[in-house]
Image (cartoon, rainbow, N blue to C red):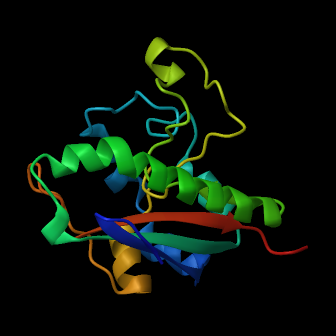
Amino acid sequence: MEETPLYRYETKTRIVPLEAFRRDLVDVPRFSGYCRDCPHHGRFWSCPPFAFDPMTVWKGYDGLLLYLCKVTFHRDRLFPGERRAFEETELPHIKAAMARELLALEGERPGSLALFAGRCDLCPVCARVAGEPCRMPGRMRYSLEALGGDCGGALERYFGETLQWAKGNKLPEQLLLLGGLLMKEDR
């Protein structure tokens, strides 16, 4: 567990049965629909629409490690404008640390694939905006939700946590970031 003046965060992992996860918590049409409603739809290579069926990704693996980063805010230390300040300053660092950890796990398991929390943000502006190919296709990763995974359902089922949403400029009590590692059985 790490602590800063404004929040503390901890990480947890769970290896879950991928077949049950696919059956119960992957719904590509549903989550692609949510993505279509996003103002950034079609502006990142890590997000839909894709030129492939996301189910082919899920079906290419045998196991799933879920990686949760739980950020709990110190309510008495927050301030007006807290959400914007946190999202601009702290959140990128937390997501980058989480991505580094997932990539390290990916490196330890040949044939695995890290799934980041949210969209890829390796580039300041994604090349997709200009209609160009991804500048870092070997480093870009998808997220669980971009591939149709139900993060809220996974958080409840495997971690006993419930998603909370920001209201206006106010942060929720806690922020839950969920990533993962798709794994192949040792052959």
Is 115 positioned to the left or the right of 69 in the image? right
Measured as percent of width and height from the top left, residue 142 is found at 54, 48
Point 63% across, 53% down: residue: 56
Residue 139 image-quadrant placement: top right
Q: Residue furthest right?
A: 187
Point 30% across, 46% down: residue: 87
Measured as percent of width and height from the top left, residue 93 is found at 47, 50
**Exactly how many numbered labels are in the figure?**
0
Picture layout, residue 169 above or below residue 134:
below
Picture layout, residue 155 above or below residue 58:
below
Residue 100 image-quadrant placement: bottom right
Point 53% across, 71% down: residue: 67
Q: Is residue 15 visible?
A: yes
Measured as percent of width and height from the top left, residue 159 is found at 41, 84
Point 79% across, 59% down: residue: 107
Of residues 68 and 92, the one drawn nearer to the viewer in this rendering: 92
Measured as percent of width and height from the top left, residue 104 is found at 72, 60
Q: For the C terminus, give its image quadrant.
A: bottom right
Of residues 94 and 44, the one drawn nearer to the viewer in this rendering: 94
Q: Is residue 150 visible?
A: no
Of residues 127 and 175, the one drawn nearer to the viewer in this rendering: 175
Picture layout, residue 128 above or below residue 77:
above
